[in-house]
Amino acid sequence: MVVLKVSPGDFSNFNIADVIIEKLRARNISELFPVQFKTYDIISSGRDAVVLARTGTGKTLAFSLPLVNSLIKGQGSRPSSPVVLVLAPTRELVTQIATDFESISVHGIKVTSVYGGVPYRPQCDALRQGTHIVVGAPGRVIDLMEKGVLKLSSVRHVVLDEVDRMLDMGFSKDVESILSKIYNSENSEKPQTLLFSATMPSWVSEISRCYLSDDALHLSLIDEQETKTSTNVTHLALLCPYESRAATLSDVIKVYCKGRESRCIVFCERKKDADELSASDAMSGDCHVLHGSVPQDKRELVLQNILQCAQIYLVHVCTFGLIHCKPACTKLKNWESEKRFL
C-alpha cells in the first residue's frame, strides 16, 4: 500500500472556504507557509497570539486568511462599524496589507485602508458606507476616531503588524491610545488581539501583558541563535571612502544587476542620502527616490513602477513597507552612509 505524505501546509489540513482556496491558487499559492499553518487553527479559534517571524515569510496571510475565513462564515449585511482593525507603521505597508485582504475576500466583504498624506474625504466616505476591515496607520486612525467617523465599538479582532517598527517610528503612544479606547469601549467581550513582530522589545512585551489573554499563543519562528535577517539574502560589506560612495555603489549595481529585467532597491539611512545619490553623475541607469517627503501620488507611482520597470530605486529606510515588494526585485541592497559601508 502506497502512503502519500501530506505536507503540513496542505489546504486539506485546514478548514478554509473553497472560494478562498481558489483565490489563493489564482495567486500561485499551493500551500500554506510555516508562519501560516502554525498559526491558522489558533487564530481561527479566537485565541490571542504573539508571533515572531522574519519579514517576507508570509505574515500578512497568517492573519488575513483565518480572519477572512471567519468573516465569510458569519457574513451578513455590511456592518456600520468595522469588526477587524489592523495597525501598521507605514502607508506603503497599510496598502500592501489591504491588498492582501482584498485578494482573498469574496464580494460583500469590504476592506478600507486609512493613512495620512491624502485627503480625508474618500476615507471618511468609505467608513460611513460601512466596512468589515480597516487597515490603517496609527496617526490617521486616531484622527478619524477624533472626528467621530471611525467607531471601534464593534471591533472583534485587533492586529498589530510590524509592532517593533511602530515602536522605532515613535507610534507607541498612538498605539496605546487606540488599544485603550477599544478595550474600554462598549464591546460586550474582549477582542481577539494578534501581535506580529520580528523582534520582542520590552514595549511589545508590555503590550502583550496588558492586552492579551493569559492563554495567548507565543510562537517564535526565529531561533534565538539566528540572525533576525532573512536567510535567502546574500549580504556583502564593502568599505569605501565617503566621497566615493556613489561610484562604488554604481559599480556594485553593474556587477550584480545585469539584464533588462534587473531591478535594484537601495535603502538609505537618511532622506538626504537618497536625494544626493540619485543626483550623482556616477549613478548609472534610471534612478527614482522614495521617502516621506515625496508627494503621495509620486510615491504610489514609484511603487507601481518597481513591479514593472528595470530601474534603480533609492529608498529611505523608514519607508519600511516597501520591503514587501522585494520578491519582484532582482537584487536588494543596503547603503549605510554614516558607517562608510555598502
Image (cartoon, rainbow, N blue to C red):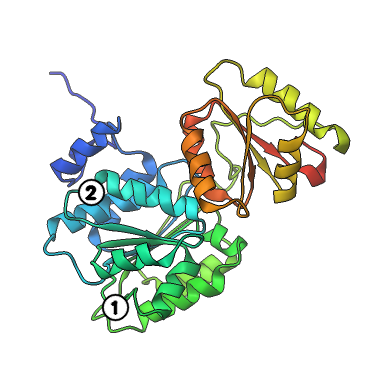
Spot occupied by residue 286 in the image (x, y as percentages of width and height): 63, 28
- State which tag comes first along the sequence, 2 or 1: 2
Residue contact at pointers 2 and 1, CB within 8 angstroms: no
Task: Please tell me whether residue 286 is drawn above or below residue 258 in the rendered image.
Answer: below
Residue beneath label 1, please? 153
Q: What residue type is labelled 2?
A: Ser
Q: Callout 1: few (<14), some (14-19), or many (20+) C-alpha neighbours within 10 Å? A: some
Q: Which amino acid does label 1 sit on?
A: Ser
Spot occupied by residue 281 in the image (x, y as percentages of width and height): 78, 29
**Quadrant in which residue 335 is drawn:** top right
State how far apart marks 2 and 1 are (Cα): 23 Å
**Quadrant in which residue 331 is drawn:** top right
Residue beneath label 2, please? 105
Q: Residue at x 20, y 52 (%)?
A: 69
Residue 327 shows in the view: yes
The foreground one among 154 and 150 is 150
- Element type where label 1 sits in the image: loop
Query: Relative to residue 45, is residue 173 drawn left or right?
Result: right
The foreground one among 163 and 307 is 307
Spot occupied by residue 260 in the image (x, y as percentages of width and height): 55, 17
Query: Relative to residue 43, is residue 235 drawn left or right?
Result: right
